[in-house]
Image (cartoon, helix red, strand yellow):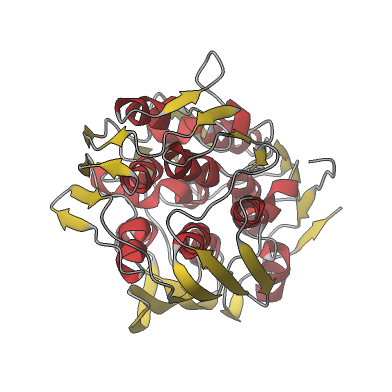
Amino acid sequence: MSQTITFQVQPGGSLRGEIRVPGDKSMSHRSIMLGSLAEGVTHVTGFLNAEDAISTLEAFRAMGVEIEGPVNGEVTIHGVGKHGLKAPEKPLYLGNSGTSMRLLSGLLAGQPFDCVLTGDKSLESRPMKRVTVPLAQMGAEIVTQENGTAPLHIKGKAGKLQGIHYDMPIASAQVKSCLLLAGMYAEGETSVTEPAPTRDHTERMLNGFGYPVTREGSTARITNIGKLTAARIDVPSDISSAAFFLVGASIAPDSDVTLRHVGINPTRTGIIDILRLMGANIEVLNEREVGGEPVADLRVRSAQLKGINIPEHLVPLAIDEFPVLFVAAACADGQTVLTGAEELRVKESDRIQVMADGLQILGVDAQPTKDGMVIKGGGYIGSGEVESHGDHRIAMSFSIAGLRSSGPITINDCANVNTSFPEFRDLATKLGLALTSF
């Protein structure tokens, strides 16, 4: 990414008001993938118009799918059916999107054409063996770099994939989804057992398109018998984006924020559960179901947080929200301990090390461990200059820290906020955060 963006946040303030954060990123990706493979025209509202989701959309356009939009969150997908994709003329560039690359590797393994998946520097450093190894057990042929990273050279094995049972060694919705998508093109049954619950948007949305996925306990099953039928999809607001304001309104005095139409899928609500254990004042209002997904309005008001030992069973349910939870821990009374979160080390950055480095620069006692962090709270956050390492969630988390800092915080390398939440600065300043960018 050629542009560089620096955030600067002035200290203090409170957050007040009502907003609707953009659409859920996970569901936006999947709506494009499954809508493209469906028969008929799929209409999507609430689509996240951000770089990661657009990477998926452009990939399917490159494979011959006519897609209109996005305009005001609306996308119209003219599906080509399960076997209607065409070979792209050049490698598919997926930017910073790990979801796009991992899910597409499964979906493309069973096509009748070859293709190459590439990405930016950050994406091409992320581990892909976690999908290529089980896909190889199904008969897929994917060549990676020596260390198992992208570019991925995928040889289409249409009609030659075999269903397998796979016990996932780590809880990962991307791995599970990758194998289920490959299972749509594999002989026999493909089943995936997860060691802890992960987001289940793929299973829910496949069923919403009329493609049968069964679930027994921690195992999901799929076969190659079935078709997808066009559907209407209303993407709720992304709880991962809402998380910044859940924490911000909790730690800033005199705050009162309502976040509208937020997806509260039970595989994604770890952020709410963890904050409540810390003493946060979060109300879940107006619960309803939209397109098979639970949705609610979330009202959050200031609270004095306390440090906790974060229960390990909640870790996979909040894996993307830990950068901003580390900020909450810095503002809490007492010590917060996170364990069982090794996955954070292989996100867009090593989120354990990068957050620890930044918090230490700001005067917080934050000690990284192999699989988590120990943070001694107390509420003091100083001022200083921190590095986001091009990681959108790091950049936004340190912005929220400004609500309790003693002086300005400068955050470098923030252009990648556009991958998930382009409206972050506008919505944050509307609520009262003194954030500027240059």
Residue placed at 39% from the left, 43% from the top?
178
Q: Is residue 55 above or below residue 122?
A: below
Q: Quadrant of the N terminus?
A: top right
Please, is residue 35 above or below residue 348 in the view? below
Q: Residue at x 34, y 33 (%)?
A: 160
- Residue 170 percent location from the top left of the image: 30, 34
Q: Is residue 206 visible?
A: yes
Q: Residue at the left extreme? A: 216
Q: Residue furthest top?
A: 146
Task: Give the answer, above or below, for where 119 lies relative to 107.
Answer: above
| Number of marks in the rendered image | 0
Q: Which image quarter: residue 88?
A: top right
Give the residue at the far bottom of this rendering.
286
The residue that appears at 59% across and 54% down in the rendered structure is 60
Residue for point 36% across, 57% down: 202
Q: Nearer the viewer, residue 78 or 242?
A: 78
Front one among 45 and 65: 65
**Percent coordinates x, y for residue 72 in the rendering:** 67, 78
Query: Relative to 289, is 263 on the left or the right?
Result: right
Percent of width and height locating residue 308: 32, 47
Q: Quadrant of residue 200?
A: bottom left
Residue 195 falls left or right of residue 305? left
Left or right for 18, reference 371: right
Q: Position of residue 226 (x, y in %)?
A: 28, 60
Q: Is residue 45 visible?
A: no
Picture quarter containing residue 373? Answer: top left
Placement of 385 over or under 367, stated as above or below: below
State the residue in front, 276 or 19: 19
